Image (cartoon, rainbow, N blue to C red):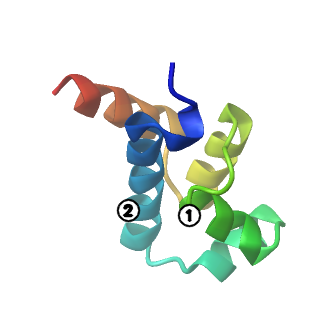
Amino acid sequence: MEKSLKSAEYARLIALLVATRHKAGIRQQALARKLRKPQSFVAKYEGGERRLDVVEFIAIAEALGADPLKLFRRFVREKSG
């Protein structure tokens, strides 16, 4: 099994988070402030250098004003679609 950090599925998950951030009109720096993390945290997971866990996914989605469950359902639905 391919490492999840380099997998196409993981890249698709990150692309969904990036698209959600762009749609919300939030820059990396502003998102990092909301998460109480350095801007490099956002840059590293968006750039594929750092893997997110599910707790971080939820925090990021909520910081972007998105429902984490709906976002995850969209991710799963698009895989099968």
| Pointer 2 local density, CA inside 10 Å: few below 14, some 14–19, many at least 20 | few
Give the camera-side residue of 29 and 68: 29
Amino acid of disc 1: Gly
**Residue 1: percent from the left, percent from the top?**
51, 18
Q: Quadrant of the C terminus?
A: top left
Residue 22 is situated, as x and y percent measured from the top left of the image, at 41, 72
Residue 29: where, in percent of width, then height? 67, 81
Rendered view: 55 above or below 41? above
Of the numbered discs 1 and 2, the one sitting upstream in the chain is 2
The residue under label 1 is 47
Element type where label 1 sits in the image: loop
Q: Which residue is mark 2?
A: 19
Would you place residue 11 above or below residue 47 in this image?
A: above
From the top left corner, tell me how far across and down residue 18 is, in percent. Answer: 45, 62
Which residue shows up at 24% across the image and 33% down it? 78
Using residue 56 as the reference point, say whether residue 72 is left or right of it: left
Residue at image location 44% in from the left, 78% down from the top: 25
Please, which residue is most extreme toward the left here? 81
- Confirm or deny contact between disc 1 and disc 2 (CB under 8 A): no
Please give the name of the residue rendered at 46% of the width and 37% of the height, measured from the top-left corner. 7
Q: Which residue is found at the position 82% from the left and 66% from the top?
A: 37
Q: Which label sits in the foreground, 1 or 2?
A: 1
Q: Nearer the viewer, residue 60 or 66?
A: 60
In screen coordinates, is 3 left or right of 25?
right
- CA gap, disc 1 and disc 2: 13 Å
User: Splitting the image into 4 quarters, where does residue 12 fall?
Assistant: top left
Q: How many marks?
A: 2
Circle 2: element type: helix
Q: Amino acid at mark 2?
A: Ala
Q: Please say if 53 is above or below 31.
A: above
